Amino acid sequence: NRLLAWQRTGFHFQPKKNWMNDPNGPLLYKGWYHFFYQYNPFGAIWGNIVWGHAVSKDLIHWRHLPIAMVPDQWYDANGVWTGSATILPDGKVVMLYTGSTNESVQVQNLAYPADPCDPLLVKWVKYPGNPVLVPPPGIHHKDFRDPTTAWSTKDGKWRITIGSKLNKTGISLVYDTDDFKTYRLLNEVLHGVPGTGMWECVDFYPVSRVGENGLDTSYNDQTVKHVMKASLDDDRNDYYAIGTYDPVQGKWVPDDPTIDVGIGMRYDYGVFYASKTFYDQEKRRRILWGWITETDSEAADIAKGWASVQGVPRTVLLDQKTGSNLLQWPVEEVEKLRLNLKSFDNVDVKPGSILPLDVGSASQLDIVAEFGIEKEVLNLVNGSDEEYICSSSGGASQRGALGPFGLLVLTNDDQSEQTPVYFYIAKGTDGKFKTFFCTDQSRSSKANDVRKTIYGSTVPVLDGEKLSMRILVDHSIVEGFAQGGRTTITSRIYPTKAVYDDAKLFLFNNATQANVNASLRIWQMSSSNIKV
Ligand code: DQQ
């Protein structure tokens, strides 16, 4: 069917067919980026989980390789679940992953490349002594999964952390090891947050407070902060917090306990889950992969024969200007796909107006937009103490003095299907401004079996900064990055009319008072090459 065919993406990672979920064990080895992922070889729904495998020279064009690991042992008979890679100082690779055993107990297993000389790492060997870790006393046998990349300790050991929960407190257990075969459980958890439930796919890594580069997972000195991320099974979102790691105690504390892991910031305010970072030792950057699930119906997934994409890999850095959030940005390689630049400079967008942007076919785009508002109007408008919340607001049709304004992506000519990605500025009675970045899916599709949530959150805007956003549109996925990646929103969009040549792009300003001045650079995007 034509609509279902249109939903397949042009430059996002996808297997040819079937179900995919979490990114697993990403790494750069002998010049090849390796990407493993949770995969069901037999259908478009979750189950029979194996490790799919693909390689790339640039994180954009991919070559699918044979399945790397299948459930062929008692200790992973119910699934080869999520895991992470560690590159040892001598260049050897170890992979730790969770197996769901024949009795559905979650255990950790060790695997390594059969032939370290093979840059494609096609064949994997499971350690004969598996499992290397079983749930410790007091931990439920189904609450022990997703080991991280290991980092080194001062006394020359390796340390990993594994998500779990105790009652309703999400926790991260810590283990030390010399050889990845035997482990010692530390008395204290790395961190825990009451009320957050099971922590899946914990990630833990340093970010620099002073440098421009990403850092190796083992790097630690006075110039770093540590990021802790947990994927909350209860609400299916990835939460992170920035804090300080004490390697002696093996404990991490958040800078601000009111925005701790699971109760504060998210990587992304749309769909983005089970993410994992790795350190790219050649380009000296930390790269984040996240699983973007479908938000249509299971029946639709079965009909199209596939489910899920991976987000465009993002570099992650500490935002040194605010010191309190990360910056996520599509890896630079994605810019190689840009074609046919169209620039629009200083376009006046009057309150209540919608302007078409003629960019030709608009199913695959990279949009960079900057917005300015006149200073006077900011002073003129009255403040209000009513709280603006993207998700419970009226979306792009709720008018305020200073917003919403932004772009309508995947929109047909009569705008009966439209996906607004926008800013909304709220002024408090104290005269302070708060900026929100939102994506409104409520009119994104005529179909009634798709999610129509309004996504979004606040975005820090510093004095003197213009408002800026970048949007990647790729058929059924739209990724928005505000203020250089301080706040991001990924959505899956399933139009029925705004498809193929009828998918268009508009600029809009639905504020009642603010005149907006917009400058845009827009590229069509060519497709990446994904070879079987
Ligand atoms: N997916 C894996 C688990 C992980 C979950 C199973 C997160 O290891 O906790 O497919 O999406």
Image: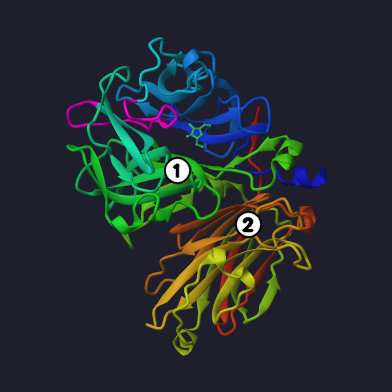
Secondary structure at numbered mark 1: strand
The amino acid sitting under disc 2 is: Trp
Residue numbers of the magenta segment? 136-157
Residue 298 circle label: none
Q: Nearer the viewer, residue 411 or 144?
A: 144
**Residue at 49% across, 23% down:** 104
Q: Is residue 515 magenta?
A: no
**Residue at 53% across, 56% down:** 489
The amino acid sitting under disc 1 is: Ser
Residue 519 appears in the picture as rendered: yes
- Whole-percent x and y of residue 302? 73, 36
The reply to whether callout 2 and callout 1 are in contact (CB within 8 Å) is no
- Whole-percent x and y of residue 266? 44, 53
Residue 523 circle label: 2
State whether label 1 is within 8 Å of ligand 1.
yes
166 on left or right of 352: left
Considering only vertical position in the picture, is 444 above or below 372?
A: above
Residue 231 circle label: 1
**Residue at 64% across, 25% down:** 41
Secondary structure at numbered mark 2: strand
Q: How is the image coloured?
A: rainbow
Q: Nearer the viewer, residue 367 or 394?
A: 394
444 on left or right of 187: right
530 on left or right of 504: left
Q: Nearer the viewer, residue 417 or 462?
A: 417
- Whole-percent x and y of residue 98? 44, 26
Secondary structure character of the magenta stretch overall: loop
